[in-house]
Image (spheres, grey):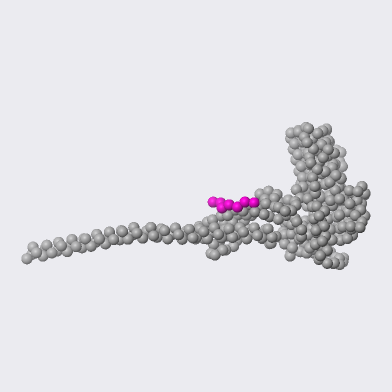
Amino acid sequence: MNHQVKKTENKGATLLLLTVLFTAASVTILLGTISPIVRQLQVARDFESSKKSYFAAEAGSEDAFYRMKNNLAIIFPLDMEFDGADVNVTSSIISETDREITAEAVESGNYRTVLKGLTVSNGFSFHYGIQTGVGGLYLYNNARVNGNVYSNGVILGGNTNPNSYNFIDGAAIAAGPAGSIRYVNASSSAYAHSVRDAIVGGDAYYQSISNATVAGTLHPDSPDPAVIDFPITDEIISDWEEDAESGGLASCVGGIYMTLTGNIWVTGNITITGSGGSGVQVRVDDSVGNKSVVMIADNPSNKNGSGQVAVSGNSNFYGSTGNDESYVMLLSANQSAENGGSNLAIDIVNGAAGNVLVYAPHGEIRLQNNVNLREVTSYKLSVYNNAVVNYLIGLAQPLFTSGPGGTWKLKRWKEVQ
């Protein structure tokens, strides 16, 4: 009897062991089946999250591109959210006419980054601190230029002592067979048919040279630099005048503040005079955004004796608030200098400064005393005393409230790691 009980107990233990083994095997098989499914689900979730991050980055870069292309307000870095993904958009300057937009998005720890390369097209740009026509550039006393100079005529300093040559902090270029550089100290290279009585911090490219100190390499028998056109054509100026005319007439009364919401065309002369205190303040309205506004003096019936601009007495010019690329342009259509006359197109003296560009494609501009401008373009330019031209533009073409003036277009696109 006892023997039979023991045998039954052994059978029970065996059955229990088989059950445990079967259960363990079933769990192992089940886990082996579930784990790939779990991994696949995780991969699917990561893939979905990664796609969401990618599309969010693309959306962020497109948003920034749209704003820049259409001159809408934008401040970098730009943070935004698309469908639960956080996006950070930055912009970097590559060259005068190129920028990059980088948008990085993250969702559930998955990062995707999109880069857009932009370039400027369909407009114009100012590549030089000063650009003159055949009339040339003349510097007197302590006048100086911080930026490159391109003249279709001469570049002539008024100080004949080498210790006080007029300083150009940049390259000096005098174009054409009559191009000449004299009594100038250029920190960079010099390019001209004739370089004489000059100090050149870089290389010298010339047909003839005499009494010049050149820190770099001499390049004799170099071809004369090409005569180049001005960046803003008469056709563009006409378009601006039509735009101003379409806005109707406005009365200008005396005062110390002037806010500009669009282009202005005066069929006569423009005079801005301030004295004492902060003087006259001319400002681009904030509603204009990062665009610029032009004030045109042009009398079609008297191109030689009218259409002049005079600025004096602590007059200051400002772009719209927070926009470094917003400017006031003073433009004269006077043609006296080009026609051999002596009337000035633009005369700026005593304290004029700020985000102001001056432009007289057919006339002479004269700058005197404590004048501090961003860029000057004219048929002829004379700079006196302590007047300084500080070239601070060119990183992007200035955009105006109407007509061409440069805009951004997509140059390349890619996803980056």
As rendered, which of 378 and 176 lies closer to the eye?
176
Q: Which residues are magenta?
A: 411-417
User: In the rendered view, would you say 221 is above or below 261?
Assistant: above
Residue at the location (67% across, 58% down)? 68
Residue at the location (66% across, 60% down)? 67
Work out which residue is located at the far front of the displayed protein and give it: 235
Q: Is most of the magenta stretch helix, strand or loop?
A: strand
Residue 412 magenta-highlighted? yes
Residue 196 magenta-highlighted? no
Q: In the image, 320: left or right of 48?
A: right
In what quadrant of the picture does the N terminus appear? bottom left
Which image quadrant is residue 183 in? top right
Give the image location of residue 15, x and y in percent: 19, 62
Residue at the location (74% across, 61% down)? 320
Q: Is residue 271 visible?
A: no
Task: Report the number of discs.
Answer: 0
Give the image location of residue 76, x and y in percent: 64, 58
Q: In the image, 43: left or right of 199?
A: left
Q: Is residue 308 visible?
A: yes
Give the image location of residue 274, x and y in percent: 86, 60
User: In the rendered view, would you say 15 is above or below 95?
Assistant: below
As rendered, which of 127 and 10 lies closer to the eye?
127
Residue at the location (83% across, 47% down)? 132
